[in-house]
């Protein structure tokens, strides 16, 4: 991993490519992709088999493990730990959504469905997105633009499988949920991380530097907004500039829109779907997990050009085949009847955000800003250079479970993430534990 000379702070991770051997017989005969092996003895000893690795291929072995899980594993099972490490609402799925799933099970809907999802759910998602976006006002989003997936995570992976291959250059705005950076690496892509900047007013995007990083030949740019972990939310001016630039150079835009409804401005967060047209290389990946409190159901979707949706249907066949029918039935009820759930959750999160941010700023040595979106406070702890060790110490010494900033990339070192999707009482309990730890360290 190295740092670009042209763009300070922009980090490029290049995969170790397989060995390519030319086929004999001159030009036009192609090449064969081989595998690099470590040097073995010329001949194994008689009656002994060579020792071969039983591990995964190098690209998989090089994936970074979850630092959040590492902290959580240190505290799971301890009853006195107040945990805010995972990005998950603390409320169960609403009863009317659960009942829809139960009723589908009772009807015996336990069989395979269409790869792209049952038509009723695809229609419901298309109608929902049309109410929010209408493809930049140029037309409705229809079921032909929708693929149902078994989670938002699956949506991101399937989209990447459809667009990215070995050696392709993918730019990712960071700090960010680590899965978004690691997914292209699984497929052998070259990942380039582009960091946001932390200021007293919050996290900001250097638009001109990002456009310079999106050089010709870049395959895709991944943008998570509202952002996990920072809460940063892209504005319309930046979206227009990025879209025009990507149109010019044929770059795909993948929007990870999981927190689209958790925006503390007016309406939903700005989306590329608001300004894109049907021919743009724009894909939106989304999930039922956050807005409708359905993390354990594992249901999501992809909104993409119709031509790409057809390819995604094939990929779905070779991944999960389809999402479970009873889960899809619950998804229909959530998206058609769940607006009160979204509104109530947003009100609750806004109150929790304001409470937690104010209390954090009262603790000496902590620098916190008010996030404009998502459900996290991502704050700087002065004097902390190893956030993983700090968070482990919080667990062992203070009984407080938070996520280390390093989990979201090197740009996050020295920061800590706190998921505020919790009651004010629990947040206050956590604040007191953090205060004692920071003041007396």
Image (cartoon, rainbow, N blue to C red):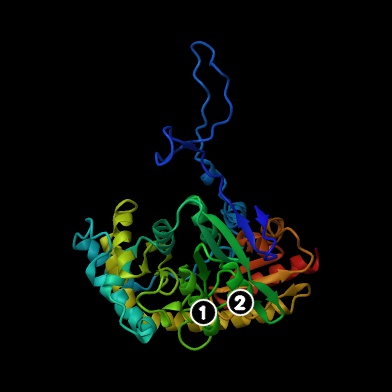
Q: Residue at x 30, y 81 (%)?
A: 140
In the picture of the structure, the residue carrying the numbered disc 2 is: 207
Q: Residue at x 53, y 73 (%)?
A: 421
Of residues 254 and 65, the one nearer the viewer is 254
Residue 234 in percent (x, y) is at 55, 79
Q: Is residue 323 visible?
A: no
Q: Residue at x 55, y 64 (%)?
A: 171
Left or right? Give the position of 262 relative to 136: right
In the picture of the structure, the residue carrying the numbered disc 1 is: 239
Residue 315 in percent (x, y) is at 33, 55
State which tag comes first along the sequence, 2 or 1. Answer: 2
Of residues 274 and 333, the one nearer the viewer is 274
The total number of labels drawn is 2
Q: Residue at x 33, y 60 (%)?
A: 312
Quarter location, residue 382:
bottom right
The crowd level at tag 1 (other Cα within 10 Å; few <14, some 14-19, many 20+) is some
Q: Secondary structure at mark 1?
A: helix
Residue 97 in percent (x, y) is at 32, 72
Left or right? Give the position of 400 relative to 264: right
Which disc, if any, is residue 257?
A: none
């Amino acid at each position: 991993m190295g740092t670009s000379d042209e763009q300070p702070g922009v980090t490029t991770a290049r995969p170790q490519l397989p060995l390519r051997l030319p086929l004999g017989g001159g030009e036009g005969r192609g090449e064969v992709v081989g595998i690099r092996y470590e040097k073995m003895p010329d001949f194994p000893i008689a009656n002994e088999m060579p020792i071969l690795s039983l591990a995964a291929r190098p690209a998989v072995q090089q994936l970074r493990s979850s630092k959040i899980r590492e902290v959580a594993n240190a505290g799971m099972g301890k009853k006195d730990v107040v945990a805010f490490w995972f990005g998950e609402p603390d409320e169960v799925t609403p009863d009317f959504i659960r009942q829809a799933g139960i009723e589908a099970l009772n009807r015996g809907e336990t069989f395979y469905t269409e790869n792209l999802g049952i038509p009723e759910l695809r229609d419901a998602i298309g109608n929902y997105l049309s109410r929010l976006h209408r493809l930049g006002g140029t037309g409705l989003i229809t079921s032909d633009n929708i693929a149902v997936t078994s989670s938002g995570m699956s949506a991101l992976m399937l989209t990447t499988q459809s667009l990215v291959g070995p050696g392709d250059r993918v730019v990712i705005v960071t700090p960010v949920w680590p899965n978004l950076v690691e997914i292209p690496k699984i497929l052998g892509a070259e990942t380039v991380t582009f960091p946001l900047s932390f200021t007293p007013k919050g996290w900001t995007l250097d638009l001109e530097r990002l456009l310079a990083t999106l050089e010709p030949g870049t395959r895709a740019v991944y943008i998570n907004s509202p952002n996990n972990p920072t809460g940063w939310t892209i504005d319309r001016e930046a979206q227009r500039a990025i879209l025009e630039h990507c149109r010019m150079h044929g770059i795909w835009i993948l929007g990870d829109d999981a927190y689209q409804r958790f925006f503390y401005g007016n309406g939903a967060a700005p989306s590329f779907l608001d300004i894109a047209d049907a021919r743009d290389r724009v894909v939106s990946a989304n999930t039922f997990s956050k807005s409708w409190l359905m993390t354990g159901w594992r249901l999501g979707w992809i909104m993409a050009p119709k031509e790409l949706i057809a390819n995604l249907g094939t990929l779905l066949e070779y991944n999960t085949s389809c999402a479970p029918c009873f889960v899809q039935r619950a998804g229909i009820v959530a998206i058609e009847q769940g607006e009160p759930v979204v509104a109530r959750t947003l009100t609750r999160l806004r109150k929790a955000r304001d409470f937690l941010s104010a209390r954090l700023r009262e603790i000496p040595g902590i620098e916190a800003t008010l996030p404009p979106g998502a459900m996290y406070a991502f704050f700087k702890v002065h004097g902390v250079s190893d956030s993983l060790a700090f968070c482990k110490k919080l667990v062992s010494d203070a009984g407080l479970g938070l996520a280390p900033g390093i989990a979201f990339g090197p740009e996050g070192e020295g920061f800590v993430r706190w998921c505020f999707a919790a009651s004010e009482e629990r947040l206050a309990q956590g604040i007191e534990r953090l205060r004692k730890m920071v003041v007396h360290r």
